[in-house]
Amino acid sequence: MGGATAALFALQWLHVLFGVFWLGSQMYSMLVLYPETEKLSAEQDAAIKDALRSGRARRFTLVLAIGTVGLGIIRGIAGGALDRLGEPYGLTFLAAAAVGLYMVGNVLTRGYGNRAPSWAFNTGFAVLFTLMIAMRFGL
């Protein structure tokens, strides 16, 4: 494996690892954890959610979000996506970068100051996932 191929492999590997961790964390929180905490008293529910939105959990989310999107953009550029902007693959890359940057902004600003609805953030994951699959097929 040549140096350039090894670098692309490493970028792709890290990008996918971070993305799986970020998406999995979000899915677990939204589908399992939060519905269970809502069965507790309002004070307990709020305390748990506050703890999950700060400290170590917050740092992990920031690293995963920035890592996923940043590595994806770097990997795309290193793999020649900018040379293919007139093709479906290049346009898909630009769309994924735009959605990814929106999502990183959402994480960094805590939902753009709570102005961004949670459904938009969660929909962003579905859109990004779909765009990633499309790019694997050269679209």
Image (cartoon, rainbow, N blue to C red):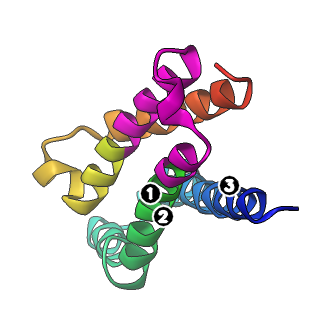
In the current view of this chain or complex, which residue is farthest to the bottom? 55
Q: Are marks 1 and 2 in contact (CB under 8 Å)?
A: yes
- Local SS, label 1: helix
Q: Main secondary structure of the magenta part?
A: helix
Which label's residue is closer to the chain start, 3 or 2? Answer: 3
Please report the residue visible at 49 percent of the width from the left and 65 percent of the height from the top.
64
Magenta stretch, residue numbers: 73-100
Q: Quadrant of residue 110?
A: bottom left
CA gap between label 3 and label 2 equals 11 Å
Question: Amino acid under label 3?
Answer: Gln
- Local SS, label 2: helix
Please report the residue visible at 31 percent of the width from the left and 78 percent of the height from the top.
54
Question: Amino acid under label 2?
Answer: Gly
**In the image, which disc is placed on residue 12?**
3
Q: Which residue is mark 1?
A: 70
Q: Quadrant of residue 32?
A: bottom right
Q: Is residue 135 visible?
A: yes
CA gap between label 3 and label 1 equals 11 Å
Q: Is residue 115 magenta?
A: no
**Disc 3 versus disc 2: nearer the observer:** 3
**In the image, which disc is placed on residue 67?**
2
- Local SS, label 3: helix
**Where's residue 68, x and y in %?**
51, 57
**Where's residue 15, x and y in %?**
61, 57
Of 133 and 33, nearer the camera is 133
Which label's residue is closer to the chain start, 3 or 1? Answer: 3
Question: Amino acid under label 1?
Answer: Gly
In the current view of this chain or complex, which residue is farthest to the top? 87
Where, quadrant-wise, is the C terminus in this rendering? top right
Q: Residues within 10 Å of mark 3 (few under 14, many from 20)?
A: some
